[in-house]
Amino acid sequence: MRLSADTPIPASVQTPGYDRAAQVAGIVHIGIGAFHRAHQAVYTDDAMRSGERHWAIIGVSLRSADVASQLNPQDGLYTVSTRSVAGSELRVVGAVQQVLVASDNPQAVVDAIAAPTTHIVSFTVTEKGYLRRPDGSLDLAAAIGGSSLYRFVAAGLAARKAAGLSGLTLLSCDNLAGNGGVLRRLMREYLAAYHPDLSAWFDGECTCPATMIDRIVPATTEADRAAVEAALGARDEGAVVTEGFSQWVIENDFAGPRPRWEKVGAELVADVAPYETAKLRMLNGAHSALAYIGLGAGHVFVHQAIADPAIRPVIERLMREEAAPTIDAAPGQDLTAYAGALLDRFANPALNHRLIQIAMDGSQKIPQRWLETLAWHQHRGQRWPSLEAAIAAWIAFLRSDHTIDDPLGDKLREAVAAPDATQRLFGEGGLIASKWRPESLA
Ligand code: CS2
């Protein structure tokens, strides 16, 4: 039996508990992968459980039909398993109404964005989904392509303007430094090139709040789906597995109505930057270092790498002595405690988080995770041995037999085969945008 609205759910499993069929969709989410389903959709489900209304989510996949074929036959329902040493907890999430595949039905996506009931378009398209060139500007040729978020958003906004509707909040939930500002700037570049008639309307009617999003979500395995099936008594093809921890800090800058996500644990703040910078440089910076150093040492999972006595001190130093000093903490933000909490989360043995999953797209992740920290220390003439080890491990990874899953894959392979690899990667005009220059590396 497949999970659906008619499936009897065991009493031990939390269910939506609100009238799903009566909810209008208020959010279109582009890039409905496992992260969104374990994070924003859960906050939104909780908000509707607490009485918020009409915030159902229409999910969009830009390319792949996988998530649509997982969730649509299940009436949008799926389970989230939270795993810790104490055990596993299962809930059914009801926030997603349906999933559209943009490549199959582009007009349906535009119509959803243009619907009068839609107030928010949110994004988890990963770092590379923003289609930036190494200098940070929009790759205009890629952005006019069929799987570009910009095309769909611009077409939806054009329809809203023509219909006399209000603008939207465009909410980036990706791990970029200043994600809201980046999205706003790139959207403006797109409109200036392809829809100049919309530029002023966009500036006046739409906002792009910055967000810090955090929850560790390993890719779901067949064993995970089998465990869910045993507990649920029904097959869930859309199951996601995650940790208990979850954090969402959102800049309070919405163009129109929004769910009161703060009722269910999200933090609405004036300035996200201190949280976002700490998260990128400490959590994600340590994650990427664990990935490359850990894979080099033969580990498979994050919890194995962090338990390795040769690796743990390198990661602790990276967080506490290299990344933390570069962050202007917000009042009450305790970076020492944060580092300790991150080490505990990495050590969670109930979560089989593969290092190779984190290792992908290094060219897109490393600038905001490592290079800003490095530039800070270089400017002060200081040493940064952990990040040095991490960079060396990334280069070793690029030279290894591992498959390189990265939009710059071939170029990276070519660069690291040369004797001046670090210059070709990080030097003037190199492949990776960097304020840091690798003078001290061979
Ligand atoms: C990870 C992130 O895959 C990666 O690059 O570093 O997905 C990380 O697990 C999340 O950002 C945690 O919030």
Image (spheres, rainbow, N blue to C red):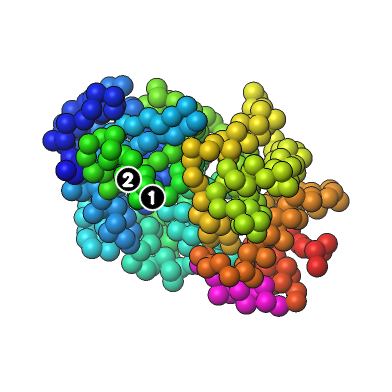
x and y percent of residue 232 in the render?
26, 35
x and y percent of residue 83 in the render?
44, 34
Q: Is mark 1 within 8 Å of ligand 1?
A: no
Tell me the residue at 19%/44% (across/down).
2
Q: Residue furthest left?
A: 6
Numbered disc 2: secondary structure: helix
Q: Give the crowd class for mark 2: few <14, some 14-19, many >=20 residues within 10 Å.
A: some
Residue 225, disc: 2
For the stretch drawn in magenta, the main secondary structure is: helix
Whether residue 213 appears in this view of the structure is: no
- Examine the image and state in which quarter residue 195 appears: bottom left
Q: Is residue 11 magenta?
A: no
Q: What amino acid type is highlighted by mark number 1?
A: Thr
x and y percent of residue 10 in the render?
23, 27
- Examine the image and state in which quarter residue 313 appears: top right
- Does residue 10 sit above or below 173 in this rendering? above
Q: Nearer the viewer, residue 365 or 237?
A: 237
- Does residue 286 sit above or below 15 in this rendering? below
Whether residue 10 appears in this view of the structure is: yes
**Quarter of the image containing the C terminus?**
bottom right
Q: What amino acid type is highlighted by mark number 2?
A: Arg
Tell me the residue at 33%/40% (across/down).
227
Q: Give the number of callouts.
A: 2
Contact, mark 2 vs mark 1 (Cβ under 8 Å): yes
Residue 332, disc: none
Q: Which residues are magenta?
A: 407-418
Q: Give the crowd class for mark 1: few <14, some 14-19, many >=20 residues within 10 Å.
A: few
Q: Is mark 2 within 8 Å of ligand 1?
A: no
**Which residue carries the number 1 mark?**
221
